[in-house]
Amino acid sequence: MAQPPELSAVEAAALWVAHLTAYAPLVEIAEVGPGDVVLINAASSSVGLAAISIVRRLNATPVALTRTRRKADLLRLGAEAVIVTDEEDVVGRTHALTAGAGARVAFDAVAGPALTTLLHALAPGGIVVQYGLLSQEPMLFPLDVSARKLTITGYGLDLATDTELRRRAYRFVKDGVAAGAFRPVVADTFPLSATAEAHAVLERNTHVGKIVLIP
């Protein structure tokens, strides 16, 4: 992908994968629009941060989910609210934020028990788009999914095979950058010779945003 003139080379390197990954689940599958509340777990990841900016671009309300308070302050710079999942009742906080209605959309990178929790936090007619498997634990399927007409759908590597989807996604992200709505968060940079060190930072999972290798 080309480097947008509005971004540095490092920012451009951090832009495309994250924003293109979040585009289809939010824009084309869930059809996020004005007034929607969107739950985003693993929100401190590059895809999670991209999702926050895309939800804002769509005039909807992003609610970031993160495990600990260590990353909460940084997430509040973009998200409307932050829920610390290791300390707070996700369902209760979501209903408090939505006057009891629940969120319409959840963007899920975790699966496992977290997916069960997201389903309980959704409003009737809501949708979960599940794109990651950070948890290897099983989920429990809530008995009221059918009664509340909830949708659970997955998203994979559609951009790799669908040329028209790729073009729409590229245009959406490019326009968002030009409008000043999308600016990727770069957590750190490493020379290519320090790839092992960069991977060690990833494994510690203390960063927020993208780690970029520089040749």
Image: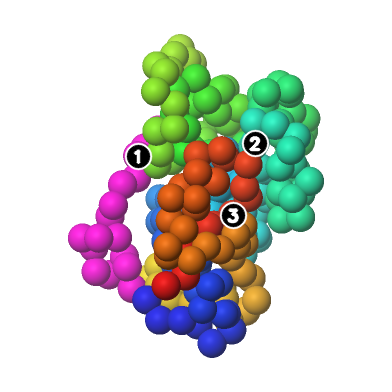
Q: What residue is shown with label 1?
A: 154
Q: Position of residue 153 (x, y in %)?
A: 36, 37
Looking at the rendering, the stretch of residues picked out in magenta corresponds to: 148-167
Looking at the picture, does residue 10 appear above or below residue 6? above
On the image, numbered disc 2 is attached to which residue? 66
- When asked about the image quadrant of residue 99, the answer is top right
Which residue does the image show at 54% across and 87% down from the upper left?
A: 5
Report if residue 61 is visible in the image.
Answer: yes
Label 3: few (<14), some (14–19) or many (≥20) C-alpha neighbours in 10 Å: many
Which-is-in-front pick, marks 2 and 1?
2
Q: Secondary structure at mark 3?
A: loop
- Which amino acid is tagged 1? Gly
Task: Tell me if mark 1 has few (under 14), some (14-19) or many (20+) residues whose alpha carbon lies within 10 angstroms of its own.
Answer: few
In the picture, measured across the screen, residue 154 lies left or right of residue 19, that is: left
Above or below, comparing residue 58 to residue 116 in the picture: below
**What residue occupies the far left of the structure in this picture?**
161
Alpha carbon separation for disc pair 1 and 3: 23 Å
| Amino acid type, residue under disc 3 in the picture | Gly
